[in-house]
Amino acid sequence: MHPQLAEDLATIDSLFETVKLQGLDYLQQLSQRPTTAVAVEYSQNLSDEGVGTLKALELFNRQFEPVIIGSSGPRFLGFVTGGSTPAAIAGDWLASVYDQNTQATSGQGDISAIIEKATINLLLELFGLPKSFLGGFVTGATMSNFTCLATARQWAGKCQGKNIAQNGITQGLHVLSANAHSSILKSMSMLGIGSANILKVEMEEGNRESIDLFDLENKIALLNGQPFMLVSSAGTVNTVDFDNFKAIAALKVKYNFWWHIDAAFGAFAACSPQYRELLDGWEYADSITIDCHKWLNVPYENAVFFIKAQHQHLQVETFQNSNAPYLGSLTDQFSYLNFLPENSRRLKALPVWFSLTAYGKNGFRAIVENAVDMARRLGEFISSSEQFALLAPVRLNNVCFTLKDNGDPELVAVFLEQLNRTGKVFMTPTVYKGEKGIRASFVNWRTSIHDLEIITTTMISIARSINN
Ligand SMILES: *Cc1c(COP(=O)(O)O)cnc(C)c1O
């Protein structure tokens, strides 16, 4: 054994104690940690002998630690960024420690897929979804959308008598959507469908980002009965709008299409009786994407897909890994190897299993309702303020706003830049219905009224300073 490895192994006790204390220190100071840092370029040569983990930690603490931002903290409102609960971190640590390769539920060696399947069932319960869905873990909602659309692609091929997984794409794949997330287009590009081949459906009138059902039927008519894939939204990124799932479910009776729902974070509306009805009818979808590293507050990289069990053959045709004889036959056992894009995978289910087991339905109800409450309060502050104006109603956990009309649209960017530079809060820019604006997204489990006070005070003082 190399001496550095031998020494690390001999001192693993004190080593991990040091790392644990450092981690605790970070978590305890998280709310004071700046939400931005100045980027520094860094280069290093690979040494021959290495320095051991303790010295590596010292180097990390000198070079990187000071510029690591509080993005897992309570006032990082950019994108849709969750944090990590204690249970999630415990599960994630143990996933590294046990270092299983999650593939099969029986047979050769590792059986951690049993934990994955059990965790998928807990998630179905959390979301109130039927057991007719089979699910699995992937790295993020992008890969979840990819997995669902890959299976949808196989379905669309089959409708035309083609096996696309085996023979490649010919043509004639149609995707319809009103407000597809960028990752849908990325998935279409990776799947050879081509991101330009999205048929854009109009959004509903007024302050909506949801699919216009009348226009949807017009667009369907243009396809002359050809099969198509419909991508609908449970939670658009700007204003968290939801498509009318009951109405779309009714269309399933009339038309031949694969129905996918991107519910990356909107799925969590199901955790609260107050918001659950936004999702009414979603159980009739063929596939659903949900991110865990957002509102479930587990560490990156963690998401699930749910695909109806009746489509399992399409999924296995798409992802089968059966040309490797040493991995055994397809039909022996259930294996995630033949079910999703990755082959070797860490035990991503564990942080989710810990979280769901530790906090239960009401724990997540509280996280969701708190985030929505924070967003509503920020929305109320904005609509009653002199400096700011809402761009859209606050539907759930995102606030989309701008500066009050002052004749200079560039000021929005100046305001945001200065706001973020304070390091006390982080928000991201957006464009809503052609207007430049700012988005604040509440998903972190720690955010409190106290944080909101810091946020609004900082917003007011920046707005005053740029108006002078
Ligand atoms: C975040 C998000 C995605 C992409 O998720 P990643 O986890 O970044 O891959 C897809 N769709 C929606 C609606 C999202 O909010």
Image (cartoon, rainbow, N blue to C red):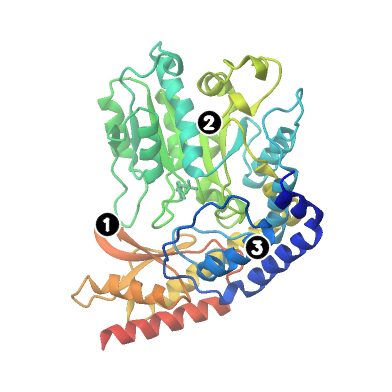
Residue 208: x, y in percent? 35, 53
**Residue matched to label 3:** 55
Residue 246: x, y in percent? 48, 39
Q: Which label is found at residue 265?
A: none
Between discs 2 and 3, the one toward the N terminus: 3
Q: Nearer the viewer, residue 417 or 4?
A: 4
Say what secondary structure mark 1 lies in. loop
Residue at the (65%, 57%) spot, across then down? 364
- Give the residue furthest to the top: 161
**Residue matched to label 1:** 433
Could you tell whether 5 is left or right of 84 in the image?
right
Residue 305: x, y in percent? 55, 37
Between discs 3 and 1, the one toward the N terminus: 3
From this viewpoint, is residue 281 visible? no
Residue at the (33%, 20%) spot, across then down? 226
Say what secondary structure mark 3 lies in. helix
**Residue matched to label 2:** 341
Residue at the (34%, 34%) spot, across then down? 176
Q: Nearer the viewer, residue 43 or 137?
A: 43
Kind of residue indicated by mark 3: Lys
Residue 38: x, y in percent? 42, 70
Say if 341 sits above or below 94 in the image: above
Say what secondary structure mark 2 lies in. loop
